[in-house]
Amino acid sequence: MRLIFLILITLIIATAVGLGATWMTATRGVNVGTITIGAWTARPKTGTSDIDPYSRASVARSGELPVGTGDGVTFSAAKDDSGKLLNGQCDVAVKGVTPAARFWTLTIYDNKGQLVANSLQRYGFTSQEIVRGSDGSFEVRITSRARAGNWLPTGGLDRYMLVLRLYDTPVGVATRTQKDAPMPAITTVSCP
Amino acid sequence: MIRWLFAIIGGVLLGGVVHLVSVLVLPRVATLDAYSRLAPLTKLNAVTPLPAAGPGSAPMPYMDPAFASAVCRYDLSKGPLKLKVPVSQAYTSVSFYTRNDTAYYAINDRSAGRRVIELDLMTSDQHADLPEEEDVTAADRLIIDSPTTTGLIVLKALAAEPGLMRQAEASLAAATCGIQPAQAAAR
């Protein structure tokens, strides 16, 4: 009787630990083949047949289709450069230049990967429509209140993430540093 | 006391096994993965345009709202598939996914180098059945092997500005995909 009880406990622990770990890794992802540049991370192998089992599980769980490597690379950021979580109440600036690519898009998503509703129907910018400075750099302001220039509305959302997709780009598995791929800086300018 | 320790350590070790197995099994049993989400919305072996991505209305999470997209859900069991995608003004790409949502091939308009991206998709068995000389004469014919019999082809056309979305959708509307009869493929 005691033995059965012990075995039962063992199995319960095994199930909890095993499935718990799987849930954690499938939601948060595991840093296998991750490129981190500033606040941005990318997993270029996710767009190939060499995708690691953890990314495969996370893709299956979220229901997204990863951007294929011959198409482009996806960089995402949920924190600013100082490690603070992006907050929709705050005034956040994305400033700088992007790596070489034929086109890029910057999009704002909520934590579930849905677009953020707003009356302007503006969910992001493409490299063609963004307003740039004379040196070719740009600054996007991400706030809940309207601003002049490149403004992305957050709709007052608590948490959100930014996704920068580079299309037709040499950036990929071999990319390591800011020098290969200069990513724009993300800074929280002010919070109410 | 020692028994309890044994049960806990055993449980954690066994938990590691459960974790590895469930990570490997998850993609096969997921019911809300991209293929399952798109299956009821799309026609088999034909191009179906996807609705424009909007908040709450996107068929999949993390869709790029700057793109018009269409899907060809394929089943190669009846023969190879022929795909033709006219190139849009800005940027067009074609990505291939297996049944388990793995991107195994992607091509864009520049790497295709023509006004129309033309591809033949087949299983490796069907590719092996192709006559030898066919491969040679078809040097400019792009043949892609699909690792699975079923899967998804996603066609995307960039609307660099929101006003160009109509044009991007129109260029994708001219795309075709369909099964080619086995004889025609072997000829």
Image (spheres, coloured by chain):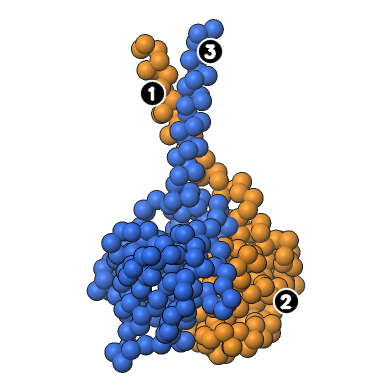
Chain colours: A blue, B orange
Identify residue for label 1: B9
Q: Quadrant of residue B118?
A: bottom right
Mark 3 — residue?
A: A4
| Pointer 2 local density, CA inside 10 Å: few below 14, some 14–19, many at least 20 | few
User: What residue is shown at x 48% (from left), y 42% (from top)?
Assistant: A22
Q: Which chain carries label 2?
A: B
Q: Quadrant of the C terminus of chain B?
A: bottom right
Where's residue A53, x and y in %? 46, 50
Q: Relative to B3, is A64 above or below?
A: below
Residue at x 44% of width, y 47% of height: A25
Mark 2 vs 1, N-terminal side: 1
Quadrant where the N terminus of chain B is found in the figure: top left
Chain under numbered label 3? A
**Which residue is found at the position 47% from the left and 28% from the top?**
A14
Q: What's the residue type where badge 2 is placed?
A: Ala
Q: Residue B184 carries which label?
A: 2
Whole-angstrom CA distance, mark 2 to mark 1, is 62 Å
Q: Nearer the viewer, mark 3 or mark 2?
A: 3
Mark-to-mark CA distance, 3 and 2: 65 Å
User: For the residue carrying disc 3, how many other residues have a C-alpha within 10 Å: few (<14), some (14-19), or many (20+)?
Assistant: few
Q: Kindly indicate whether the residue at mark 1 contacts the one at mark 2 (C-beta within 8 angstroms).
A: no
Please state the horizontal and vertical placement of residue B64, each as a whole percent of the image.
53, 72
Same chain, labels 3 and 2: no
Q: Which residue lies furthest to the bottom in this view?
A: A134
Secondary structure at numbered mark 3: helix
Quadrant in which residue A96 is drawn: bottom left
* Depicted B136 relative to depicted B104: above or below: below
